[in-house]
Image (cartoon, rainbow, N blue to C red):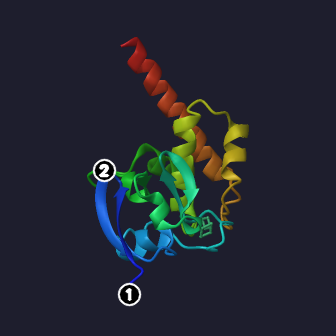
Amino acid sequence: MSDRHLIVLNVNGEPHEALVEPRKTLLDVLRHDLGLTGTHVGCEHGVCGACTVLVDGEPVRACLMFAVQAESAEIRTVESLGRDGELSDLQRSFSEHHGLQCGFCTPGFLMLAEGFLAQRPDAGREEIREAVSANLCRCTGYQTIVDAIEATATRRCHAKEKEATA
Ligand code: FES
Ligand code: FES
């Protein structure tokens, strides 16, 4: 008898069916069943944050969550950021501020920052530094990642102010 379950995951605004064993992680289902390989695999122990995705808006380690636990949640992966071949403001900022070198950690940082800025749109530099300490990057020394997120926060705040006064 198969112990696989048919589940429906809402990923990046679309429902996806997958036949999965209960022990299969959200990370493996995203990458292997749904082909969303932008979410990277690092330590698989919840330490590095390379696998960070948003689950109902919260940054979550996809290697620590079973896919069956994510049914009925709204999941966002790094593939949701760009639209129609255009990078998002946050992705552009990472590029402008050289917030990546090897880039392996980048999808995790982008989703961490996306979730963080949604909750703390006017966060200051110190708060951003604390937030990014959740994930590991061996290349950048973090300064440029913090610069990129800070610049995005500033831009988004200015855009909102402009909108309010228009
Ligand atoms: S792969 Fe999930 S935290 Fe490292
Ligand atoms: S850019 Fe290489 S680990 Fe972060």
| Label total for image | 2
User: What's the mark number on residue 1?
Assistant: 1
- Against 21, residue 55 (above or below) is above
Q: Where is residue 145 in the image (x, y as percent from the top left)?
A: 61, 52
Q: Quadrant of residue 10?
A: bottom left
Q: Which of 123 and 24 is in front in this view?
A: 24
Q: Residues within 10 Å of mark 2 (few under 14, many from 20)?
A: few
Q: Where is residue 39 in the image (x, y as percent from the top left)?
A: 47, 66
Q: Residue at position x 66%, y 59% from top?
A: 135
Asked which secondary structure carries label 1, the reply is: loop
Residue 95 in view of the camera: no
User: What's the mark number on residue 61?
Assistant: none
Viewer-nearest of discs 2 and 1: 1
Q: Residue at position x 62%, y 45% from top?
A: 147
Where is mark 2, residue-wise? Answer: 83
Q: Position of residue 86 (x, y in %)?
A: 32, 51
> Which residue type carries mark 1?
Met
Q: Nearer the viewer, residue 88 or 41?
A: 41
